[in-house]
Image: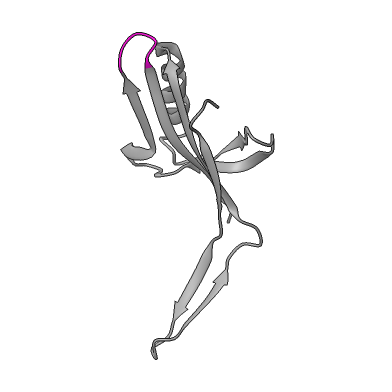
């Protein structure tokens, strides 16, 4: 990945609200889920086309794929594009020859 990319870890929690106004929360997973914001700039038309083709092959974010964390080399087998099925899942910018940019969000999923 190029500069400007980031990653974070999130816990999946469930909150139960009772009729008397009290709440009880608990974690749904034993470990946090990961999320990456991938930003790449100075891409040529071929690189942007390859990214779009991969996105479309993933049914515009509705299916899963494996993703290797560029920081630690760990491969996460079940990931998807955040905002699956929405146009906002991938942001492409084209500002001229050899001047394409992309921002996409990948998140780990578990049952």
The quadrant holding residue 101 is top left
Between residues 96 and 24, which one lies in front from this camera angle? 96
Figure quadrant of the C terminus: bottom right
Indicate the position of residue 85 as horizontal and vertical percent values: 37, 42
Asked if residue 44 is positioned above or below residue 1 in the image, the reply reads: above
How are the colours assigned in the image?
one colour
Majority secondary structure of magenta residues = loop
- Residue 26 in the magenta stretch? The answer is no
Q: Nearer the viewer, residue 48 or 39?
A: 39
The image quarter in which residue 100 lies:
top left
Question: On the rendered structure, is 33 left or right of 101?
Answer: right
Q: Position of residue 72 (x, y in %)?
A: 68, 37
Residue pictured at 44% horizontal, 38% vertical: 61
Numbered disc total: 0
Residue located 64% across and 41% down the image? 76
Is 51 positioned to the left or the right of 93 in the image?
right
* Outermost residue to the front: 3
Which region shows up in magenta? 95-99
Residue 38 lies, with reference to residue 29, above or below; the image says above
Rendered location of residue 98, percent (x, y): 39, 10
Going by the picture, which residue comes out furthest to the bottom?
20
Look at 41% across and 24% down and name the residue there. 52
| Residue at screen point 58% across, 52% down | 33
Q: Residue 97 in magenta?
A: yes
- Report the residue that reaches farthest toward the top: 97
Instruction: Tell me: residue 37, above or below residue 95.
Output: below
> In the rendered image of this protein, does residue 57 appear above or below residue 75?
above
The front one of 31 and 81 is 31
Percent across and percent down for residue 79 are 55, 42
- Which image quarter is the N terminus in? top right
The answer to whether 71 appears left or right of 43 in the picture is right
């Amino acid at each position: 990945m190029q500069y400007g990319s980031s990653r974070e870890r999130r816990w999946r929690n469930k909150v139960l609200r009772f009729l008397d106004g009290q709440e009880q929360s608990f974690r749904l997973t034993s470990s946090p889920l990961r999320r990456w914001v991938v930003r790449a700039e100075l891409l040529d038309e071929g690189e942007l086309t390859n990214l779009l083709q991969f996105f479309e092959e993933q049914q515009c974010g509705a299916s899963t794929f494996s993703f290797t964390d560029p920081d630690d080399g760990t491969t996460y087998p079940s990931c998807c594009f955040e905002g699956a099925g929405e146009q906002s899942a991938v942001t492409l910018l084209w500002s001229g020859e050899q001047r394409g940019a992309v921002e996409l969000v990948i998140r780990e999923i578990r049952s």
